[in-house]
Structures are given as C-alpha cells and as structure tokens.
Image: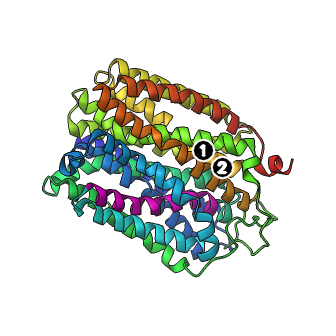
C-alpha cells in the first residue's frame, strides 16, 4: 500500500510542476513581473487547500461519528455542509473582492481555512465541530468563486491552461487528503483529531503568496479584460477600465443550465467524498484500503483536470465531454451496487472520471461569458445556485442509508441524478454567452 502512494505522489506533483513551468515560459515577456508569478503560486497553493477539509473528514468519518456520538442523519448533514456554506458564502465573494481586492479576500479565505481546520477536531461537541467546519468552508467558498475571476483577469489568453492548472492542483490536494489522512492519524498516535488538524499547516502556507499582493487591487474584479495587440503577450496586471454594466444573469438560459449542472455534479462529488469510503468499508474493505480507494477516485482528476479544460477550451461545444463523463458515472454506480468489493478499483476509477465534471464546469464558466465582469457574475450565480441545489443530496443519502440499512436506495438515487446532470451539461455546453442572451 505505501508503495502505491509513493508512486502516485511524485507523478502528480511532477505534472503540477511541469504545467506551472510551461505557463511561466509561455508568458516570459518583458512585461511579466514577479507579481504575476506570485499569482500563479498563490493560485496553485490555494487550489491545493480547496478540498482537504472535506476529503480528510470523509476518510475518518466513522471515527468522527464515534468520537462525537453522531447519528447517520447528522453525519449526512455534516457531509452536506460544504454545499450549504458554498451557496451562502460564495455569493458574497464578488462584492468582497470589489471592496477589498481579490488578493485580500483570497488571503483571508486561506486564513479562515487554516483556523477552522486547526480548531474543529478539539472542540468536543457536534455543534462546535459544525461551527468550526463552517469557518473553514467559508474560506473555501469565497476562494472557489474567485478562482475563475482571477484567471480571467490575469490570464485572459490562457483560460484553459490556468483553469487546468488549478483544477489539477485542487484534485491533487483532494487525493492527498483522502490517501494520507488515515495513515497520518496512525502515525500521530492513532488520533483522528491529529489526522484532521494536520491539514491546517498546508492552508497556513497558502496565506503567504497573497500577502505581498494585498495592496494590489488592480481593476475591479469583473471589469472588461484589456485589449491585447499580441495574443501571446501578457500584461503585468490588468489595466484599469470602467466596469461594464451588471448583467441580469437570471434571464440567461445558459446560466441556469450551468447552475443546475454545477449543482448536480457537486451533489455527486460530495456524496462520493463523504460516503464512498464508508460504502467500501461496509462491503468488507479494510479502512486503509477504503481510504486509498477514495484517493484513487480523487487522484483521477489530477491529470484529467489539466487535459479536460484545455480540450474543452478548443471545442465550440462541450456536450460530447459531458456525455462521456456521465456514462462513466452511471457505470460506476452500477458496479458499486452489483459488486462493491470485487470491482472496487474499477468503480473508483470510473467515479474519478465522472467527477472531472467539476473542472469542465469551471472551464465553461470562463467560456460562457465574454468579459471578466460577466465571468464574476456567472461564477457567483452558477456556484451559489448550484451548491444550493446540491445541499439535500448528501443528507438524503445518510437518511436512506440509516433507514434502509444498506446502500441500494442511496446508489439508486446517485444513478438517477446522473441523468439530469448529463442533460443540463449538454445544454450548458452550447456555444453561446450570457451577455448575448441577457441582451436579447
């Protein structure tokens, strides 16, 4: 088991390093400064911290439930908290960024993640654990929304590459937390508290790149990207321009399709992160192997999170990619129902492929709007509405699991939700922009 993790980690880290180096060299012009490189470093480190708060908990959910005396329904509520917090706090991100600057908000978000992760394992009660988790998830929520905005603002000519880079880093952090948390807890005195709180250190490191950028507010997030005379060149920072008028985003059918697609893929992702390890453990798979299977599901996104956005950015329509990912999800859920232990590795791989709908959705956010302000509004609307849609899913899975005593009904629910997810993704992938739709 250790040898497998050892083989996976260097390969994944190497991909992130190679992608970052390629981006730096591609834009290595006299206009590029240390500030742009700091943004790249900040984006990568921040992305690494956007999921460990969730997948580390999924790997140790049984121990947390026992330690805090949680019921199945309460555990379902805990696994649905990411969606709730992302919906409630994510909508605040564009306004906060306009007032304080995106770097300051990202810095505060990383600090909130570090504080919440450091505190929550030691609070001693379910209510306090939920409150500390909410603090960490609030930091993740604002960072989630601002990532596409920062990419559109600083790298408008390389949306696919930069989205792929931070999606790959996000997947790497997700997989690392799933794979390492259980053995880490064992090394640290067989304490689930230590295994969870250790991830606060990574978030604290992610605060540092944003500190020198706190005073740099640049253009208002959401302002129109500056015109460029040469597509290959990049500016040190975007020029100040008057912001475009706000869009009536709710009048856009594409915005609604993207929001529903985002919500349903989030439902699938958080059910997977919160419950798949428990599904394997209930099927007789050892706890350490179940955590590794969760890591395999997450690590599938590391290479594909870089490939899929680049491929999607080159296609006028992203519907075919949506169909492939949806078919993988349907096959994975079917396998979990029929032979959860016998085909565990195959089902983990298929669900990992299906979860790559997340970087695809982020890429479509950047492609379905022409301006940075449009991307900011679309990102906030799609993510906040989408996460609201995804709230009931993990809770319902917990309730169905507890009431039925098995995984048949929960897996049927997951299978059924994959069908409208695929339909909405097909609609969101059509070649149109929210500016055009709201103008009509």
Q: Is residue 132 magenta?
A: yes
Mark 1 vs mark 2, CA separation in Å: 6 Å
Q: Main secondary structure of the magenta part?
A: helix
Point out the residue furthest to the top here. 338
SS at badge 2: helix
Q: Mark number for residue 365?
A: 2
Residue 67, how many percent across, how many down?
A: 18, 50
Residue nearer the viewer, 132 or 169: 132
Q: Mark number for residue 433?
A: none
CB under 8 Å between discs 1 and 2: yes
Location of residue 144 with respect to 290 vertically, above or below: below
Q: Residue at x 27, y 50 (%)?
A: 181
Point out the residue furthest to the left here. 189
Q: Residue at x 25, y 26 (%)?
A: 283
Residue nearer the viewer, 20 or 61: 61
Question: In the image, is 92 to the left or to the right of 176?
Answer: right
Count the marks.
2
Residue 222, how many percent across, how many down?
A: 70, 64
Residue 251, how many percent across, how many down?
A: 76, 47
According to the picture, the residue beneath numbered tag 1 turns out to be 361
SS at badge 1: helix
Q: Is residue 268 magenta?
A: no
Location of residue 123 with respect to 346 vertically, above or below: below
Decide: few, some or many residues near mark 1? Use Cα within 10 Å; few <14, some 14-19, many ≥20: many
Location of residue 132 with respect to 402 vertically, above or below: below
């Amino acid at each position: 088991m250790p040898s497998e993790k050892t083989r996976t980690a260097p390969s994944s880290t190497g991909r992130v390093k190679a992608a970052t180096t390629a981006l730096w060299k591609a834009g290595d012009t006299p206009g590029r400064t240390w500030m742009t490189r700091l943004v790249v470093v900040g984006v990568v480190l921040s992305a690494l911290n956007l999921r460990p708060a969730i997948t580390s908990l999924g790997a140790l959910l049984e121990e947390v439930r026992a330690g805090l005396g949680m019921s199945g329904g309460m555990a379902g509520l805990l696994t649905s908290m990411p969606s709730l917090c992302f919906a409630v706090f994510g909508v605040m991100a564009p306004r906060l960024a306009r007032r304080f600057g995106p770097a300051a908000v990202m810095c505060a978000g990383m600090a909130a993640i570090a504080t919440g992760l450091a505190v929550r394992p030691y609070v001693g009660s379910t209510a306090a654990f939920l409150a500390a988790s909410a603090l960490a998830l609030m930091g993740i929520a604002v960072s989630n929304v601002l990532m596409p905005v920062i990419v559109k603002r600083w790298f408008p000519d390389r949306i696919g590459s930069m989205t792929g880079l931070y999606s790959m880093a996000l997947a790497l952090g997700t997989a690392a937390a799933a794979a390492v948390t259980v053995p880490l807890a064992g090394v640290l005195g067989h304490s689930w508290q230590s295994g969870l709180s250790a991830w606060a250190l990574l978030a604290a490191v992610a605060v540092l790149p944003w500190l020198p950028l706190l005073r740099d507010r640049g253009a208002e997030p959401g302002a129109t990207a500056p015109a460029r005379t040469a597509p290959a060149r990049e500016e040190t920072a975007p020029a100040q321009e008057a912001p475009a008028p706000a869009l009536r985003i709710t009048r856009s059918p594409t915005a609604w399709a993207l929001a529903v697609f985002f919500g349903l893929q989030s439902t699938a992702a958080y059910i997977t992160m919160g419950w798949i390890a428990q599904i394997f453990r209930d099927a007789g798979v050892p706890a350490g192997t179940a955590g590794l299977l969760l890591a395999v599901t997450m690590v599938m996104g590391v290479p594909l999170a870089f490939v899929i956005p680049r491929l999607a950015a080159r296609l006028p329509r992203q519907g075919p990619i949506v169909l492939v990912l949806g078919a993988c999800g349907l096959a994975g859920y079917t396998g979990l129902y029929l032979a959860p232990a016998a085909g565990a590795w195959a089902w983990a791989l298929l669900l990992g492929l299906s979860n790559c709908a997340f970087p695809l959705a982020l890429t479509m956010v950047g492609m379905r709007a022409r301006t940075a302000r449009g991307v900011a509004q679309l990102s906030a609307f799609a993510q906040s509405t989408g996460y609201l849609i995804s709230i009931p899913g993990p809770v319902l899975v917990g309730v169905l699991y507890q009431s039925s005593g098995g995984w048949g009904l929960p897996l049927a629910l997951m299978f059924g939700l994959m069908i409208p997810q695929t339909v909405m993704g097909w609609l969101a992938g059509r070649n149109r922009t929210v500016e055009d739709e709201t103008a009509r």
